[in-house]
Amino acid sequence: MSAATRDALARAALHASRAAANPYALHVHMTNKHVRAQIVRALDGHVVASASTLERVVRESEPAIRSTSDKAAATRVGEVLAVRAGASDVARVRWARAYGTRLHGKIARLLEALQAGGVALA
């Protein structure tokens, strides 16, 4: 067995063990104009729930948000995602912060709203 094959098998085993420990992962993407978040099943990559400021439901629910890229928009995305995750029976998600990245601003607001909606972070 070559070293590359051994490394690939080790990575696959690590991924499988992480997915078994916590089967859902949170993916957040922020641009200068919009905020998007998805809850993905780690085993097969299926999107279980998602929310974005591109959706009319997120933008126009009361009270309406003025900007689609500020902290209020991130909070709204977190709230909607928490409701949709609850409908899909997702109680806990894994969110891996990149090394050296501070937890503040829009990300913090989104995660706080997600937790307030009943989804725990691993």
Image (cartoon, rainbow, N blue to C red):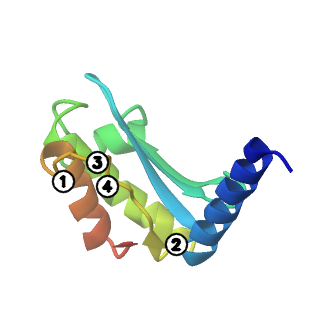
Query: Do the CB atoms of the residues marked 1 and 3 lie less than 8 Å apart?
Result: no
Task: Judge from the rendering whether residue 25 lies leftward or rightward of residue 73; answer left or right.
Answer: right
In this figure, which residue is indicated by the disc labeled 4? 78
In this figure, which residue is indicated by the disc labeled 2? 90
- Taking 43 as reference, is 52 above or below it? above
Kindly identify the amino acid type of the residue bearing the numbered disc 3.
Tyr
Q: Nearer the viewer, mark 1 or mark 3?
A: 3
Residue 64 at least partly seen: no
Q: Secondary structure at mark 4?
A: helix
Query: Do the CB atoms of the residues marked 1 and 4 lie less than 8 Å apart?
Result: yes
Kindly identify the amino acid type of the residue bearing the numbered disc 4.
Gly
In this figure, which residue is indicated by the disc labeled 3? 99
Other-residue count near label 1 (Cα within 10 Å), few / some / many at <14 / 14–19 / ≥20: many
In this figure, which residue is indicated by the disc labeled 1? 109
Q: Nearer the viewer, residue 93 or 89?
A: 93
Q: Secondary structure at mark 1?
A: helix
CA–CA distance in space, label 1 to label 3? 19 Å
Residue at 69 percent of width and 61 percent of height: 43
Q: How many marks?
A: 4
CA–CA distance in space, label 2 to label 4? 14 Å
Task: Judge from the rendering whether residue 67 lies leftward or rightward of residue 17; answer left or right.
Answer: left
